[in-house]
Amino acid sequence: MASRRHAIADDLRIQISAGRIKAGTRLPSEAQLAERYAVSTPTLRNALALLQGEGLVEKIHGKGNFVRHPLRRITYVGGGRPSHTQFPAEAPLRLSIRTTNLRARGHLTALLGVRTRSPLTEFLCLSHEGGSPHSLARIYVPRDLAPADMPSESPGCMEVEARLAELRPPLAEIREKVSSRLPTPEEAAMLRINSTLAVLAINRVAADATGRVVEAALLVLPADRADALFTTHPTTEESGMKG
């Protein structure tokens, strides 16, 4: 027999899927739902947490729980940049960009291979679908390679990449590390996701022909809307070995 939290989540999920509760609708308060289902408030919150983890419900602090609009899928293409596919969405993804000058310390010294207190510039890029956060990226570049006029908003990632490419030398190597983990409290708050929802974390480090790291990107993509695609092209020698 299903637990009460799973039974409640199943009932709400069916109503959402059938369209009886429309996307964008604010659910009744947690106290009202707890009374309706004759359960304690903690049990009701656990049921909502299941739906939040699936990306069906979004909890907005101070406002309540809302049924999410269908999320656009984002596919990270290995060796390149994130590319977005149209998965029902009413408005294009847009980026808000915050630029901060800082000094390298801790993990940033190892990530970029620089000395402590080396001047860096951070670009914090938060994509939005409508009014909801969608994905997060922190991009670090040496201060001398940072554009002085990065916009505070952009219609997409390609414009940001183009601005960064204007000052940096040609890339000779891109190293990528992909892992699945739980979001940090800060990431969960910025993306407005449940702390139990796994995220796809991608560390991408790009270097020039001299080996200098000219860009390091830390991407956080919630697992309910993200995929990663890597394509390998066998060499002629490898292909011939199969014959």
Image (cartoon, grey):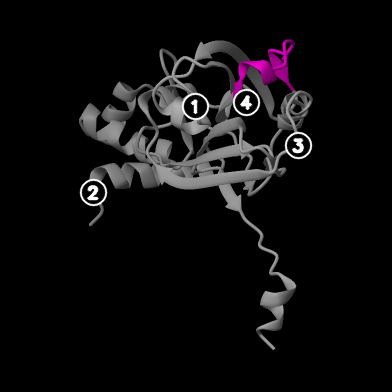
Q: Could you tell me residue 2's position as x and y percent?
A: 26, 53
Do the CB atoms of the residues marked 2 and 1 lie less than 8 Å apart? no
Q: Would you name the residue on which mark 3 appears?
A: 170
- Mark 4 vs 3, N-terminal side: 4
Which quadrant holds the N terminus? bottom left
User: What is the secondary structure assignment of the residue under circle 1?
Assistant: helix
Distance from the alpha carbon under mark 1 to that under mark 3: 33 Å
Residue 94 in view here? yes
* Displayed quadrant of residue 27: top left
Is 147 a magenta residue?
A: yes
Whether tag 1 and tag 4 are in contact, CB under 8 A, the answer is: no
The span picked out in magenta is 141-154
Per the image, the residue denoted by label 1 is 191
| N-term-proximal mark, 1 vs 3 | 3
Under mark 3, the amino acid is Pro
Q: Amino acid at mark 4?
A: His
At label 4, counting other C-alpha atoms closer than 10 Å, the crowd grade (few under 14, some 14-19, many 20 or more) is some
Q: Are marks 1 and 3 in contact (CB under 8 Å)?
A: no
Residue under circle 4? 128
Q: Nearer the viewer, mark 3 or mark 2?
A: 3
Which residue corresponds to the image point at 31% horizontal and 47% vertical from the top-left?
A: 7
Asked if residue 178 is among those painted magenta in the image, a careful observer would answer: no
